[in-house]
Image (tube, rainbow, N blue to C red):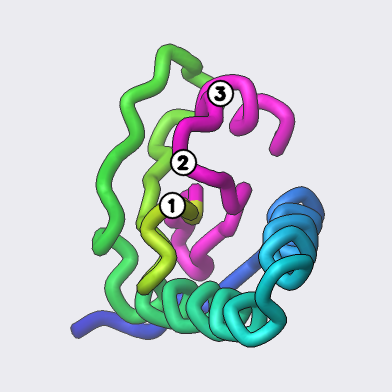
Amino acid sequence: MGTRKIPHRRRLALEDIVHHSSHIAESNLEAALRFLDAIETTVDLLCHFPEAGGAVPTSRSDVAGLRAKLVNNFGNYVVLYLITNETIDIVRVIRGGQEIDRLALQAQ
């Protein structure tokens, strides 16, 4: 196994996490806390196994290499990330069904 990569969360990814957890908390605070734990577990998994997520088919060359991993136990949410030499670059955390090309472009 290679060296563990360092997680880097972009500002929009952090905003996504706050938005999604707040939305979940409106109806279930415990589920929102589980969601936050699940995000961290998913990011930690990616730091150890960067290719655990699949390649995202995109028509945008500016996000070449974009990958996606379902959030553990919250399959309606997806972590979009890039693998760099030293980091797992968390680009966005989206809810399933959102347009990946448009959201990834906003992350630049």
Q: Label 1 near label 2: C-beta < 8 Å?
A: yes
Residue at image mark 3:
62
Image point (43%, 74%), residue name: 42
Question: Considering the image in quadrants, where does the C terminus appear?
Answer: top right
Across and down, in percent, residue 3 comes to 34, 84
Q: Position of residue 26 (x, y in %)?
A: 77, 66
Sequence-first disc among 2 and 3: 3
| Label 3 SS | helix
Give, as a three-letter code, the residue at label 2: Gly
Ranked by sequence position, the earlier of labels 2 and 1 is 1
User: Mark 2: which secondary structure?
Assistant: loop
In this picture, residue 62 sits left or right of residue 5: right
Query: Magenta stretch: residue 99 in it?
Result: yes
Reading the image, the residue beneath label 2 is 96
> Is 2 displayed left or right of 66 in the figure?
left
Residue that sits furthest to the front in the current view: 27
Q: CA distance from mark 1 to mark 3?
A: 25 Å
Q: Specify the amino acid type for callout 3.
A: Asp
Work out whether residue 76 or residue 41 is closer to the camera in this orientation and state it.
76
Q: What residue did someone put label 1 on? A: 76
Report crowding for label 3: few under 14, some 14 to 19, many 20 or more residues within 10 A (C-alpha). few
Kindly identify which numbered label has been placed on residue 9.
none
Residue range (magenta): 80-107
Circle 1 Cα neighbour tier, 10 Å, few/some/many (<14 / 14–19 / ≥20): few
Q: Is residue 17 above or below residue 66?
A: below
Residue located at (47% from left, 32% from top) = 97
Residue 10 visible within the image? no
Which comes before the other along the chain, label 1 or label 3? 3
User: Alpha-carbon distance for marks 2 and 1?
Assistant: 5 Å
Q: Secondary structure at mark 1?
A: strand
